[in-house]
Amino acid sequence: MQLTASDALGTRMRNLLLAADVPPARDAPWTARSTGEAPDSVADVVTWFGAMQAQELGSAYWSLGTRLPGWTRDDVHQALEGREALRTWPMRGTVHLVPARDARWMLELMGRRPLAGAARRRAVLGLGESTADLAVDVLGAALAGGRRLTRSGCVQALRAGGVEVTGGLAYHLLWYASQRGVTCIGPDVDGEQTFVLLDEWVADPHRPEEDEALATVTTRYVRSHGPVPRADLAGWTGLSMTEVRRGVAAAGPAVQTVDVEGKEMLVCPEALDVPAPPPSGELRPLPGFDEYVLGYKDRSLMMEPAHLAAIVPGGNGVFRPTLVRAGRVVATWTKRSTPARTIVDVKPLVPHGELDPADVEAAFASYARYLTTPVTVSLGEGP
């Protein structure tokens, strides 16, 4: 089957839950409901994606909020307190939101390569393996019995347990304990990161065989991001191309190949059952670390290559929030807060005059509802 770039982009935006309609549901978290219904919980959204970028908490919350119209930031926080999803390092050594009961098998499947590289990092830090393992034991004991400790509380526990924590050691040890599947990140308390025991936080973990696990992560990524090339699946999961081929084979008819203007890509067939709508011309503000950008290696469908430098200034890995129209990035934005309101500064990436100030201001109305504070928008000059 052949798709134009426009068809592929429309399908991709719908699968990312960023279109006016929702994906046709088959083996989706909300299949028990009408296929015309959108997801209505954090669990729905996170399970649909399989994993969502969450290294920056504010971005992760808005990634959920923009896909759950009418929800506030507090609503999202309460859903995470309710354990609808959790944060950990399931792949690529990067924090993601994952379905709670899937966290352990995801760590086991996609965490092998980051764990294998941990020894090199320890050598740089001057940290012995026995000390790292002691830190895991200390944290496990400190958190036992349903305790939740802040990051600073974890550091205090480590020091009390005989583990010296200086420089970059704290982050590495907290990562290592979670990568080993002992701890995970709990919801923030008073703005500070917390940690809990994974086995205590998740009462009924799913434990699939490896082929089922490969098929699941493949299907979830393709259904939520497709059409996508296989290389993007490898880049997103951190799996080898051999493992990617196994995952595609294990997924069977749940994924198929399509030709997008000469490029072979993967897509779930139900996404093609209903023609994709043209990408909406409505402006949509997205957070910097959203799956819309970070879910892909090849971002050419969504933006001009030259615009990536504006989204990641200096290539430092810090992604600026984007303003999207018809599936394409047209501006970046930043925010600053005062006691009374949030001020959003929009920097266009398209020629002057292509963004109407009234449309830009209207685009942030949903963000204001989510924050439950007034938002003032300042539109800068275009290039």
Image (cartoon, grey):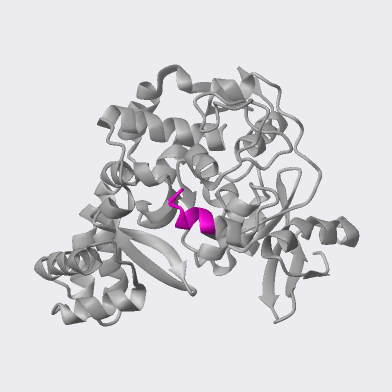
At which x and y percent is residue 62?
Answer: 61, 57
Q: Is residue 136 above or below residue 8?
A: below
Q: Quadrant of the C terminus?
A: bottom right
| Drawn side of residue 273 relative to residue 81, left or right | right
Q: Which residue lies furthest to the front in this view?
A: 145
Q: Quadrant of the N terminus?
A: top right
Question: Residue 41: in sight, yes or no?
Answer: yes
Instruction: Report the residue at 64% width, 51% height from top.
Output: 305
- Give the residues drawn in magenta, as a range: 78-85
Q: What's the residue at 21%, 76% (across, down)?
A: 158
Residue ID at (30%, 63%):
175
Question: Residue 364 appears at what percent x and percent y?
Answer: 77, 60
> Percent from the top left, x then y, of residue 156?
26, 81
Judging depth in this view, the residue of 64 and 78 nearest the camera is 78
Q: Where is residue 26 in the image (x, y as percent from the top left)?
A: 54, 23
Q: Is residue 84 left or right of residue 184?
A: right
